[in-house]
């Protein structure tokens, strides 16, 4: 039963909305409204109430006493699913004046309503659009309004007014929308090339005109604040150094992002953070501090939150970055503040994972037990599983001198179980598998050198190993390995 699409939608409703939906089904506008109300009551009693059993009932058990026919169960589900979609659309419509005005304007135009009525509603809609934050949607709506006005004037044979006024506004509105969409597409393509390590193909098909190259002064004078943000992102991705563009983008977002629509703000800050993480992965640790600063700002202004909730992956990033830069007490306070504010149906072991990361950076031995618990309990997300196994091996290394014989044996068994996990998991890309296999190989090689009796050539072997790791392209935890090998060379 819980595999049914209608169940997934019903779980989106809170208690008040359940009652509203019950009343909505009883509307005289719907056929079989009373049947749907009874069918909804079956779902409520068996799945939505506090007394509902965790075990799925049979169709006969679910419909018992309702007067509904089990043979028609599939049709009932389809009908209720359709009504629920209609209800959710109606709720969205009633909670937002903008779609009401848009649909009202469309209905008036389709019925050839008096022009004054149409113009009055369009004027009200234009006022609503002007109050919207800067976004692609706002530009599209502005363009649509200009088109509608021009078409009305053409139909009224006011062609002189169209020529004098509307063509100018249309060209301007269409150009602004096109330029923003083109910039967003170019940024997304540039980001994808970096993620998948793809070079720019000079012969690749161009489905849109290429934006003319502009310097900073031209861009700042010709583009609005939102389009200029994406222009700077594009310059950032195209630059070999990027430091000046990074600082310019950060300052620009601090000055203007509050006026952007939430999704636009989030997308632009994600570009900024992704750039920081790439640079920090290349060994430029100052960009980790930049990342920490950006995340703190996003938490303060709520950009990184979704209705006050934090995505688990964002929490993971914030914890690791702040641990690496040494803000351990801040991380502890952050985890306490957001432990009950994770987005969606979050596995409680994700909080345990983040506490284990904090314990690792505090060099606490309990990190070993915490990561073992996470590995045994947190299933279904291979990124957490990969990172948990990696942290566990690193935690064993950090406490190598204090490990018992049983713990040493357990550590070496993890090398084997980790390899098996990589081989068997089909969800992990070949590139990720190679990175983690290389980590296991190099860490095991490093431990063998440390296990052997001291030898005059050990330092030479460690320096050679350090150089090899430095040159490695696909190696997880490269910086950590280099740090630990350097510590042994200098000891």
Image (cartoon, rainbow, N blue to C red):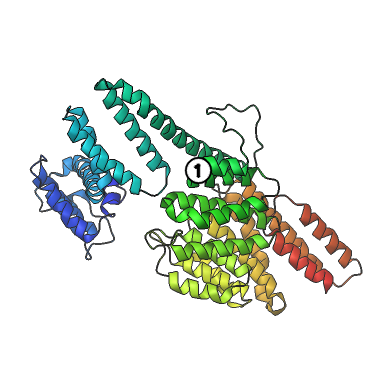
> What SS does tag 1 mark?
helix
Left or right for 372, reference 113: right
Figure quadrant of residue 452: bottom right
**Residue toward you, 149 or 400:** 149
Relative to residue 215, is residue 242 depicted above or below? below
Q: Position of residue 214 (x, y in %)?
A: 61, 38
Tell me, yes or no, if residue 211 can be seen here: yes
The structure residue drawn at horizontal position 60% and vertical position 69%, both measured from the top left corner, is 323
**Residue toward you, 379 or 318:** 318
Residue closest to the far right: 456
Tell me, yes or no, if residue 430 can be seen here: no
Q: Assign the C terminus to one quadrant of the image.
A: bottom right
Location of mark 1 (residue)? 227
Relative to residue 489, is residue 115 depicted above or below? above
Q: Position of residue 262 (x, y in %)?
A: 42, 52
Q: Residues within 10 Å of mark 1 (few under 14, many from 20)?
A: many
Left or right for 26, reference 346: left
The structure residue drawn at horizontal position 52% and vertical position 67%, both measured from the top left corner, is 353
């Amino acid at each position: 039963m819980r595999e049914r699409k209608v169940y997934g939608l019903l779980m989106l409703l809170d208690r008040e909305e359940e009652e509203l939906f019950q009343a909505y089904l009883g509307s005289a506008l719907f056929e079989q409204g009373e049947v749907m109300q009874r069918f909804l009551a079956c779902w409520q009693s068996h799945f939505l109430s506090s007394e509902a059993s965790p075990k799925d009932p049979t169709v006969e058990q679910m419909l018992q006493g309702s007067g509904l026919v089990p043979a028609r169960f599939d049709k009932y589900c389809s009908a209720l699913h359709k009504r629920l979609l209609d209800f959710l659309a109606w709720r969205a419509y009633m909670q937002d004046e903008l779609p009401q005005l848009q649909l009202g304007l469309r209905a008036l135009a389709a019925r050839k309503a008096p022009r004054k009525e149409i113009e009055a509603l369009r004027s009200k809609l234009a006022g609503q659009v002007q109050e919207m934050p800067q976004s692609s949607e706002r530009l599209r709506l502005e363009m649509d309004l200009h088109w509608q006005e021009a078409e009305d004037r053409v139909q009224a044979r006011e062609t002189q007014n169209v020529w004098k006024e509307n063509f100018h506004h249309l060209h301007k509105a269409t150009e602004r929308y096109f330029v923003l969409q083109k910039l967003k597409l170019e940024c997304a393509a540039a980001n994808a090339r970096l993620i998948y390590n793809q070079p720019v193909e000079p012969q690749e098909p161009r489905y849109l005109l290429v934006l003319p190259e502009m310097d900073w002064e031209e861009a700042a004078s010709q583009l609005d604040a939102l389009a200029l943000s994406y222009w700077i992102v594009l310059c950032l991705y195209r630059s070999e150094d990027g430091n000046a563009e990074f600082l310019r983008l950060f300052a620009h977002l601090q000055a203007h992002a509050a006026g952007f629509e939430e999704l636009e703000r989030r997308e632009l800050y994600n570009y900024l953070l992704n750039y920081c993480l790439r640079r920090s992965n290349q060994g430029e640790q100052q960009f980790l501090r930049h990342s920490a600063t950006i995340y703190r700002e996003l938490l303060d202004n709520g950009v990184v939150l979704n209705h006050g909730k934090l995505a688990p992956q964002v929490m993971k990033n914030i914890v690791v970055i702040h641990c690496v830069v040494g803000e351990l007490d801040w991380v502890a306070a952050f985890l306490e503040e957001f432990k009950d504010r994770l987005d969606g149906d979050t596995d409680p072991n994700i909080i345990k994972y983040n506490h284990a990361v904090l314990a690792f950076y505090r060099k606490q031995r309990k990190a070993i037990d915490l990561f073992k618990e996470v590995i045994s309990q947190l299933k279904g997300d291979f990124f957490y599983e990969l990172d948990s196994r990696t942290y566990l091996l690193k935690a064993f290394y950090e406490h190598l001198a204090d490990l018992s014989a049983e713990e040493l044996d357990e550590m070496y068994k993890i090398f084997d179980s980790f390899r098996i996990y990589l081989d068997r998991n089909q969800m992990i890309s070949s590139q990720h598998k190679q990175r983690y296999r290389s980590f296991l190989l190099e860490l095991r090689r490093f431990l063998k050198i440390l296990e052997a009796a001291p030898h005059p050539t050990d330092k030479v072997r460690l320096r050679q190993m350090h150089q090899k790791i430095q040159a490695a392209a696909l190696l997880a935890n490269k910086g950590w390995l280099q740090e630990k090998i350097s510590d042994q060379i200098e000891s």
